[in-house]
Image: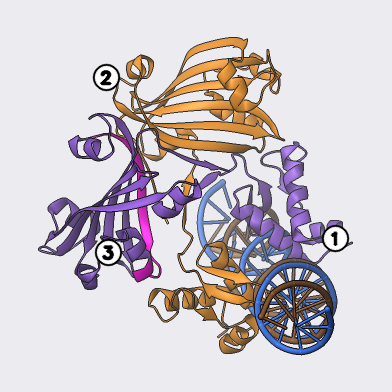
Chain colours: A orange, B purple, C brown, D blue
DNA sequence: TAGCGCATTTTGTCTAGACATAATAGCGCG
DNA sequence: CGCGCTATTATGTCTAGACAAAATGCGCTA
C-alpha cells in the first residue's frame, strides 16, 4: 500500500493537532520523510508545500520546515452572484432596476477608481428580492470610458453584476466589509427604519489594470456572512 | 530557456483576460499543452491544477479543461490576532480584562457548541485598545470541560486569544460577520452611543471535533474589513 | 572580535515515464 | 428504443533522478 501525499498531509497535521509536533518544532527534511513514509521526495514535497500554503507550517531553504508558531489562518469567503446566493437558499429571486443615469463621474468616484477628470459613468441603482422581500440594495457605477457598450445594455431584466461577469472574463477587485446605519434611501428600499444597522460591502473592480466598476451593496437587516476554516 | 509552470499559468490567464479564451472554451489537453510549451506534462499539470484551485478553470477527467463560465471567486480574509492587527497599523496596543467568571454554560452557548447539560465555562470580557482608543470589545466563552487549565490561566496581561493560540496547536472554526446595533454594554466600552452600527464577528472553534471556545467581537464604529482578490 | 565570503544544506522545480481513476460516449443487447 | 456495459480519454498521482536557488552558518581574514 503506497503512501499518498494526502496521507502525509493528514499524518503531519494529526501530529500537530495532538501536540506531538509543537509550534516552532523542526520537521525532518524531505529526504528523511520520504524514507519514513517510503515514497518519493516529490510526494513529500507536495504534501509539505500544501501544508505551507494552508498556513500550518513554514518552510525556508536550508533552515528547514517548522510548525508555525501562530498558524496563519485565513477564511475563504465566497463572492457569489446575488441571484445564485438567493436561489441556493431555495428562495425565489426577483430583480428590479430602480434608476439609470449617465453622468460624469463625481469626485469621490474618480478618486476611488483613478478615473480622469470628466470621465463618463453609468450610475445604476437596483434591488434584489428573495421570495418577494428586499434582500440587497445595489448602488453601481460603471466606467463608460472602459466599457462604452454598457450604455447599450438593458439592465431591466438582469442585474449589472451578471452582465459584467459575462462581459469581463477575468478581473481583480478590492473589497471591504463594514457596518453602516441605513440612510433614508436604503431604509426605504430595504423596508426598515432609518439608522438600522446594515451589513455593507464595497467593491472596486479592475480589468487589465484599469478600473471598470465600483459597487456598494447594502444587505437586508440581520444579514450574516458565514464561512468556516 | 525553459517554460516554468508560472509561465504557463500567466499565459493561460492572459489569454483568458484578453478574451482569446472565452468562458466555457475548451483548453487543449495536458499532452498537447506540454508540446506547445515544450515541457513535461507534470509542469503543465501543476499550472492547470493551480488555476483550477484558484477558480479560473474547471477540470473534469475525460471531459477536459474549460474556462469557467462564471469564475468562482473567493476573497481570502486573514484572521489576525488583534494585537498584530493593531501593531501592523503602527499604533500602540493595550489590553484590558474587564470581567472573569466561571459558570455553567447558558442554553444558547450549549446549543452553539454542542455542550452537555451543566457544562462548565469560563466567561471573559475584554477590551483591546489602539493608541489608547477602544478598538475591539471581546466577549469570550471557553469550555472548561475541554480546557480545564484555562481556569488557572492569567488573562490580566495577555488576552484569551493569544493564550488559546498557544494552548491549542490547530483548530477548526466557523465564523460569521454581521452588522449589529450597539447595546448599552458595547456602547459604554467602545465609547459610542447606543444603537450605533457596529461590525461584529462571531466565531466558534473546535479542536479534534470538540468545541472549545466561542467568541463575539464588536469592532469600533467605522471599522472595515478589507481584502483584495 | 567583527565582518565577509563561500561551502553546504534544504527546499523548489523540472523531466520522462508509469499506473490509477473518473467520466463520457458509443456499442451491443434485450 | 432504451438501458447498461465497456473502451477510451483526460486528468490525478507517483517514481527516480537531476539541477537550480536560497539561505544559513562556518571558516577565514582583518
Mark linked to residue A193: 2
Chain ID, mark 2 = A
- Residue A185 is one of the magenta-drawn residues: no
Which quadrant of the view contains residue B149?
bottom left
Question: Where is mark 3, residue-wise?
Answer: B212
Distance between mark 2 and mark 1 Cα atoms: 63 Å
Badges 3 and 1: C-beta atoms under 8 Å apart? Answer: no
Residue density around tag 1, few if under 14, some if 14–19, many if 20 or more, within 10 Å: few
Please state the extent of the stretch shown in magenta in the rendering.
Answer: B166-182
Q: Are marks 2 and 1 on the same chain?
A: no
Residue ID at (63%, 81%): A30
Gap in angstroms between the C-alphas marked 3 and 1? 53 Å
| Residue at the image position 26 percent from the left and 60 percent from the top | B156
> What distance separates the C-alpha of mark 2 from that of mark 3?
38 Å
- Of the pair A97 and B75, the residue shown nearer to us: B75
For label 2, the crowd category at 10 Å Cα-Cα, with few meaning under 14, some 14 to 19 and many 20 or more, is some
SS at mark 1?
helix
Who is closer to the viewer here, B57 or B111? Answer: B111
What residue is shown at x 34% (from left), y 70% (from top)?
B167
Specify the subunit that label 1 lies on. Answer: B
Residue A108 point in image, percent of width and height: 56, 20
Q: Which residue is mark 1?
A: B35
x and y percentages locating residue B153 in the rendered image:
25, 68
Amino acid at each position: 500500500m503506497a503512501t499518498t501525499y494526502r496521507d502525509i498531509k493528514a499524518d503531519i497535521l494529526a501530529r500537530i493537532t495532538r501536540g506531538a509536533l509543537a509550534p516552532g518544532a523542526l520537521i525532518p527534511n524531505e529526504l528523511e520523510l520520504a524514507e519514513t513514509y517510503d515514497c518519493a521526495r516529490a510526494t513529500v514535497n507536495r504534501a509539505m508545500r500544501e501544508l505551507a500554503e494552508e498556513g500550518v507550517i513554514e518552510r525556508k531553504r536550508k533552515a528547514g520546515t517548522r510548525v508555525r508558531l501562530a498558524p496563519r489562518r485565513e477564511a475563504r469567503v465566497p463572492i457569489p452572484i446575488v441571484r445564485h446566493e438567493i436561489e441556493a437558499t431555495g428562495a425565489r429571486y426577483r430583480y428590479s432596476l430602480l434608476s439609470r443615469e449617465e453622468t460624469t463621474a463625481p469626485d469621490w468616484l474618480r478618486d476611488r477608481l483613478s478615473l480622469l477628470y470628466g470621465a463618463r459613468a453609468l450610475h445604476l441603482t437596483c434591488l434584489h428580492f428573495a421570495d418577494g422581500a428586499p434582500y440587497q440594495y445595489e448602488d453601481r457605477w460603471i466606467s463608460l470610458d472602459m466599457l462604452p457598450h454598457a450604455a447599450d445594455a438593458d439592465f431591466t431584466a438582469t442585474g449589472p453584476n451578471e452582465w459584467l461577469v459575462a462581459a469581463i472574463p477575468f478581473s481583480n477587485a478590492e473589497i471591504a466589509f463594514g457596518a453602516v446605519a441605513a440612510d433614508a434611501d436604503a431604509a426605504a428600499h430595504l423596508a426598515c427604519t432609518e439608522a438600522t444597522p446594515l451589513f455593507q460591502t464595497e467593491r472596486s473592480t479592475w480589468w487589465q489594470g484599469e478600473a471598470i466598476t465600483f459597487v456598494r451593496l447594502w444587505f437586508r437587516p440581520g444579514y450574516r456572512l458565514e464561512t468556516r476554516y
